[in-house]
Image (cartoon, coloured by chain):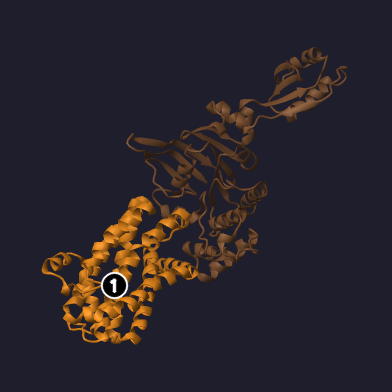
Amino acid sequence: MKLVRDTWLIFCRQMLLVVRTPIRLVIGFAQPIAYLILFAPLLKSALAPLGATTYADAYRIYVPGLLVILLMLGSFFAGFSLLAELREGVIERARVTPVSRFALLFGRALSEVVTLLGQAVVITLVAIPLGLRVSIGPLLLAYVLLVLIGLVGATVSYAVALSVKNPAALGPLINVVQQPLSLLSGVLLPLALAPAWLVTVAKVNPFYWATNGTRDLFDGNIGGSGVWQGFSLMAVLFALTTWWAITRFNHQLR
Amino acid sequence: MIETRGLKKSFPAGKSGTVEAVRGVDLNVAEGVIFGFLGPNGAGKTTTLRILTTLIDPDAGEATIAGVDVFRDPGGVRKVCGYVAQGGGTSGQVSAREELVLQARLYGSGKAEARERTDAVIEAFELTEFADRQCRTYSGGQRRRVDIALGVIHRPKVLFLDEPTVGLDPQSRARLWDEVRRLRDEERMTVFLTTHYLDEADALCDRVSIIDHGEIVAEGTPLELKRDIAGDVVTLGVNGSAAAAADLLGGSSFVRRLETSKKGLLLYVDDASVAIPQILRVLDGSGIVFDGMELNRPTLDDVFLTKTGRLIRES
C-alpha cells in the first residue's frame, strides 16, 4: 500500500514537471507527426508487396511501428532526466525520507511512459483522418503493450545512466544501442520485406516481437500469436530490467 | 541525542587504493544544542553527515540518533532526522509550496496535514512573499531558507545542515543563523551543522568538534577551545612605567605570563572578564598611569592552528 502511495506521489510530482516544461512535449510531438505526414504517404507503394493497396492498409502497418519507436526511443532517454535530478539534489532530498526506493525509480519511469503514451494517443488520433482504421478494444490493449515497452526502455536507461553516471557518455551509448534495436524490430518497414538472414538476426531482438504484437493488435487480431509473444516477452524483460535498475540504484545510492 | 563510536569510511581512489575519509569518529551531541562540525574541505565532515543520515554505509562503527540505531533501523532514523544538503534540492520549475507539500507527504503525512504543515513553515520561515513562485526565481538566501524549511517539515528531533551558509551574503547569513537559533530555542531541535567558517562555529554553535584528516582533534564549547590553547591577552598601554606595572602584577595569581612589548605590557590571562577588574584593582592607587587597555581573545583560527599546525585557510 505504501509502495503504491509512494509511487503515486513521485509520479504526480514528475507529471507536474512535465506540464511545467511544455517545450519538451512540443518537441516530443513534432517528430512523429512529421514522420506520419511526410513519410507515410511513400508507404502505400512501398508496402504494396505486403498487400497494402490503400492508405488505410499502409497506416495500419506503419502507425504501430511509429508508436513502438516513439515509446522505445523516448523512454531510452529517461536516464538523462534522472542524472539531471541527481545533480539538482532532488533525489537525495527524497532519499533521506522514508519513501520507498522502488517508488523513487518506478514513479519516475511511469511518468516518462505516460507522457510518451499521451503522445502516442495524439498520433493515433491524427492518423485516423489520414486513413487509419482500428477498433477500440485491440487499440487499448496495444497501448498496454506500448506502456510495457516504454517501462522496459526507461528502466534500462536508468540502469545504464546509474552505471555511467555521465550524461556526455550516456548519449552516444544510447545511440549505439537504440539504432540496431529499432532497425531490427521492423518499426519503419516490416521485416517481412527483409531477406531471411536479417529476419533471423531480428528474432533475437525482443522489440521485434513487441512490434509484431502491436501490429497484430492494430489489425484487430487479438488472438494473433504476435500478441501473446510480445506481451510475455515484454513482461519478462520488464521484470528483469526493473530488477537491474533497482539493483544499480541501491548499489550506487542506497 | 547523537552518539557515534568509531565511525570509519574509505572510498576507492583510482588505482592507488583508497582514501580514508573518516577514520574513527566518536561524537556525543546533547539534546537541544547547535553542534558545529568544523574542519577544512575534505576533512570528512560531509562523509560523516551522510553516514548519519543513512545516505551511505560506514565501513565500521556504531551510531544512534534519538536512541535509534542508524544502521539497524535506517527507516526509523529517517523519521527523526532532517537533512539539508550543501547544494539544496529543489526543482526550478515548481514552487516552494509544492515542494514542501510533497516533502511532507514523502514523510507520510496525508494531504490535509501536509498542507497544514506547509502553511506553518511558510509562516515560520517568512516565505509567504515568494512561496508560490517557481524556485528558479529565488535569490540564494531565499532558496536556502526553503531548503531548511524542507528539512524540518516533518518536525524532526535532529536537523543536519551541510555547510548551510556557503555562498550567502552577510545579511542572508545572519538571517540564517537566526533561523537556526530559533529552531533550537522554539522547536527544541538539536542542530548538527558542518562548516569550514571559524566565525560561524564561534558565533552560532554551542559546541564544536574540530575534524581534520578524518579524525577529531578537539571538542568543546567555542570558549573552552579558545581558552584551552591560549587564554585571553590583555595589553596595557603603560608607557614609561611598564617595569613598575610588571612588578606589581607579576606575582598575581590571575596572570599566567607577562611580556613587555612596544605596545605596552602584555598580560596572558585565563579569562579577561575575571582578570580585568583585578588588574584595575591592583593598579588603582599605585600611581601608575595607563593610557589604554586592549583585549585580544584567541579565535578558533588559533585553535585550529594549535591543533593541526595549519591555518584552516591553508588546508
Q: Which chain is orange?
A: A
Q: The chain drawn brown is chain what?
A: B
* Residue B285 percent coordinates (x, y): 88, 19
Q: Residue furthest left?
A: A196
Who's the residue at 83% across and 14% down the image? B240
Q: Neighbour class for label 1 at 10 Å: few (<14), some, many (≥20)?
A: many
Q: In the rendered image, is residue B194 in sight?
A: yes
* Image position, residue A26 (x, y; %): 44, 72
User: Helix, strand or loop at disc 1?
Assistant: helix
Q: Toward which corner of the image does residue B223 lie, by quadrant?
A: top right
Q: Nearer the viewer, residue B70 or A158?
A: A158
Is the residue A57 above or below the residue A166 in the image?
below
Measured as percent of width and height from the top left, residue B217 is found at: 51, 31
User: In the picture, residue B257 is in which quadrant?
Assistant: top right
Which amino acid, mark 1?
Val
Q: Nearer the viewer, residue A115 or A64?
A: A64
Q: Residue at x 27, y 83 (%)?
A: A138
**Picture layout, residue B171 above or below residue A232:** above
**In the depicted structure, whether residue A252 falls above or below residue B113:** above
In the image, taking residue A20 as reference, residue B200 lies left or right, namely: right
Q: Identify the chain of the residue marked 1, using the numbered disc in the image.
A: A
Residue B57 vertical position relative to residue A177 in the rendered view, above or below: above
Left or right for B281, reference B181: right
Where does label 1 land, which residue? A68
